[in-house]
Amino acid sequence: MDFAFDARTEELRANLLAFMDEHVYPAERVEHEQRALLSSPWDTPDVVEDLKAEAKRQGLWNLFLPDAEYGAGLTNLQYAPLAEITGRSPHLAPTALNCAAPDTGNMEVLAQFGDEAQRKQWLEPLLAGEIRSAFAMTEPEVASSDATNIETRIERRGDEYVVNGRKWYISGAMNPNCRIFIVMGKTDPEGSDVRRQQSMILVPRDTPGVEVRRAMQVYGYEDHSHGGHAEVLFHDVRVPASNLIGEEGGGFAIAQARLGPGRIHHCMRLIGMAERAIELMCRRSVSRTAFGKPIAQQGVVQNWIADARVSVEQLRLLVLKTAWLMDTVGNRGAHTEIQAIKIATPRAVVDIIDKAVQVHGAGGVSQDFPLAELWAAARTLKLADGPDEVHQRSLARREIKKYL
């Protein structure tokens, strides 16, 4: 593996770093101020649309999609350092670049598994940033970390499918510009192969029977800039049979394909969040004095800063190795590494942000610094895309299998 960034990556990094300095960081406070004046907190502030227009003008748009027909045509290894930069402002920068979850994963699903009509109707406006989307998988009544537990039913009736179920923590669903749900449910609940019982289907938000019931909080935050996380009911929702993505029984495989690149994106953004926390921790420690000397000269704080730097460097190399393996041997060949980054990265980044909060004292848990929101986002990723414990179980089984 060559650890040096190629020329295209270096150029995009330079452009993106300048975009962050000139546009994104100054917009963070403006976004909060404008959102407070909106008739609905779920509407999009003008400054976000301005950022999107500027990113598109600068060619910093759809960088995540490796298919050059739809996106920038970057490999996972090329995109990873760009995702890290956006992680320094995770509630604003990914959206500005049209690289925000869950739209990224949904666009990947449509690009890989959607038919021509589905791509025309839904992928194209998503690529243009004209609409938003949601991925409806998690359910409150079952342990959704085991996708075979999902109870939502997708039943074929003539030329239609009928969807019934209850989902929650459906990211982006509170945004009024969210126009389409990708819903995962069971088309064959009695099938002998539990991994072939599930399918995915496209459900427009305005379909009769779709009820976006309420916003779910995350550690007390409503996550307005992300589009919220909603509880959604599907009651006798009828959609054309042509809305099925791929084939019946293909939902589990599509979900696995969707999560591979997504974990690279999440983990690199987490590293960007850690870098910003380290920067804030260092700035705070040199500007405050306690017990007769700057906090930066306190041994415990120096240990925190040193450990944070070591952790970030280790994590970055592991995630870049994973991205490189995905590019060279595919998601299956990178299976162990994909699980490893999912386990290691949120765990370490939560601790780094927590130490930065401690250095800031009361300011660390206030709205005057981004640390509290960063901590909540990082801690949530120990659950998102599968709980850490599920990945530990799977990874351990692969290791033990070598000795059986």
Image (tube, helix red, strand yellow):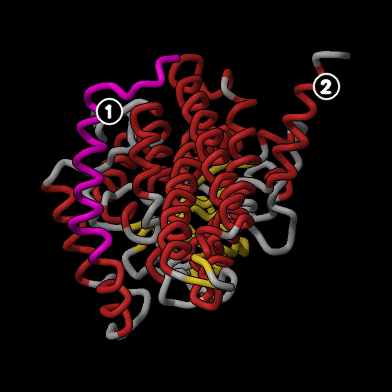
Dot 1: few (<14), some (14–19), or many (≥20) neighbours within 10 Å?
some
Nearer mark to the viewer, of 1 and 2: 2
Hey, which quadrant is residue 191 in on the image?
top right
Q: Nearer the viewer, residue 246 or 397?
A: 397
Q: Identify the residue at image location x=61%, y=55%.
A: 299
Q: Nearer the viewer, residue 14 or 285?
A: 285
Q: Is residue 163 left or right of residue 179?
A: right
Hey, which quadrant is residue 306 in on the image?
top right
- Dot 1 and dot 2 residues touching (CB under 8 Å): no
Q: Is residue 164 left or right of residue 32?
A: right
Q: Earlier in the sequence, mark 1 or mark 2?
A: 1
Hey, which quadrant is residue 351 in on the image?
bottom right
Please identify the residue farthest to the left as the structure is shown.
57
**Where in the figure is residue 11, as x and y percent of width and height?**
20, 32
Q: Which residues are magenta?
A: 1-26
Q: Identify the residue at image location x=57%, y=69%.
A: 218
Which three-letter amino acid code belongs to the residue tagged 1?
Answer: Gly
Can you identify the residue that label 2 sits on? Answer: 400
Q: Secondary structure at mark 1?
A: loop
Can you identify the residue that label 1 sits on? Answer: 73
